[in-house]
Image (cartoon, rainbow, N blue to C red):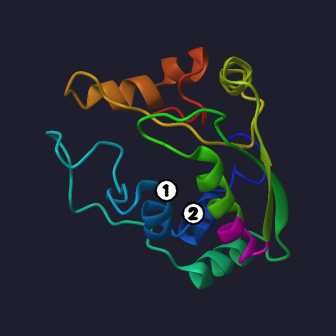
């Protein structure tokens, strides 16, 4: 959220509207998944089902880019994890699908990856523009997501990769 053009909420929203999450669930997870619309899973206490999802809407994405002054598009590095994880069995394929979706709205993504240790080190240092990561809660407490991933302290120590602070 610090680096241009990601410092503009409309750009971030546009890129989210541009991603076909259902297609990713089918291709990467063989249909065995649910698109996230909250930070915490629906099985966890505190989950709010009233939160509205960013549905796949490339036209809305284009309109938001235009409002943000990015109607000609831009180029971005999209970091893809070099490893399989329980929450992402094929990060490269997912990155390719995001890349294709973003291209439809004029955003050219260059997929970048590093050896896993280097990837984590560079991501924690904030070298990325857009980075793919995941999280698996391990204690049933929503704070395991909120504090660990989005607190101001986490922005300083590296687990808050977006550097957004609540």
Snapshot quadrant of residue 102: bottom right
Say which of 12 and 57 sits in front.
57
Snapshot quadrant of residue 117: top right
Q: Is 54 on the left or on the right of 73, as rendered?
A: left
Q: Is residue 105 magenta?
A: yes
Secondary structure type for disc 2: helix
Q: Which mark is residue 8?
A: none
Say which of 69 and 33 sits in front.
33
Q: Is residue 84 magenta?
A: no
Q: Is 111 on the left or on the right of 15, as rendered?
A: right
Which residue is drawn at the image coordinates 59% and 45% (left, top)?
91
Which residue is drawn at the image coordinates 56% and 67% (left, top)?
19
Q: Is 17 on the left or on the right of 82, as rendered?
A: left
Q: Earlier in the sequence, mark 1 or mark 2?
A: 2
Instruction: Work out which quarter of the rendered image holds the C terminus and state it.
Output: top left
Please report the bounds of the magenta region as a residue range. Answer: 100-106
**Gap between marks 1 and 2, in whole Å?**
23 Å
For residue 110, above or below residue 15 = above
Q: Is 18 on the left or on the right of 34, as rendered?
A: right
> How far across and how far down the image is residue 66, in percent?
73, 77
Which residue is drawn at the image coordinates 74% and 20% (left, top)?
118
Looking at the image, do the residues carrying marks 1 and 2 touch, with CB atoms under 8 Å apart? no
Say which of 91 and 142 sits in front.
91
> How far across and how far down the image is residue 64, in percent?
64, 74
Say which of 119 and 92 sits in front.
92
Q: Which mark is residue 13?
A: 2
Question: Seen from this angle, which residue lies furthest bottom?
Answer: 59
Instruction: Work out which quarter of the rendered image holds the N terminus and state it.
Output: top right
Disc 1: which residue: 28
For residue 58, above or below residue 48 = below
């Amino acid at each position: 959220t610090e680096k241009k053009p990601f410092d503009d909420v409309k750009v971030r929203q546009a890129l989210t509207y541009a991603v076909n999450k259902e297609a990713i669930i089918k291709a990467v997870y063989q249909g065995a998944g649910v698109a996230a619309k909250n930070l915490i899973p629906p099985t966890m206490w505190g989950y709010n089902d009233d939160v509205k999802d960013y549905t796949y809407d490339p036209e809305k994405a284009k309109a938001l880019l235009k409002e943000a002054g990015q109607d000609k598009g831009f180029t971005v590095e999209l970091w893809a994890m070099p490893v399989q994880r329980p929450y992402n069995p094929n990060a490269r394929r997912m990155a390719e699908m995001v890349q294709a979706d973003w291209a439809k709205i004029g955003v050219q993504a260059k997929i970048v990856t590093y050896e896993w240790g280097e990837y984590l080190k560079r991501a924690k240092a904030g070298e990325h523009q857009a980075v793919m990561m995941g999280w698996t809660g391990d204690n049933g407490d929503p704070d395991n997501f909120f504090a660990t991933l989005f607190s101001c302290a986490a922005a300083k120590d590296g687990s808050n990769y977006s550097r957004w602070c609540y």
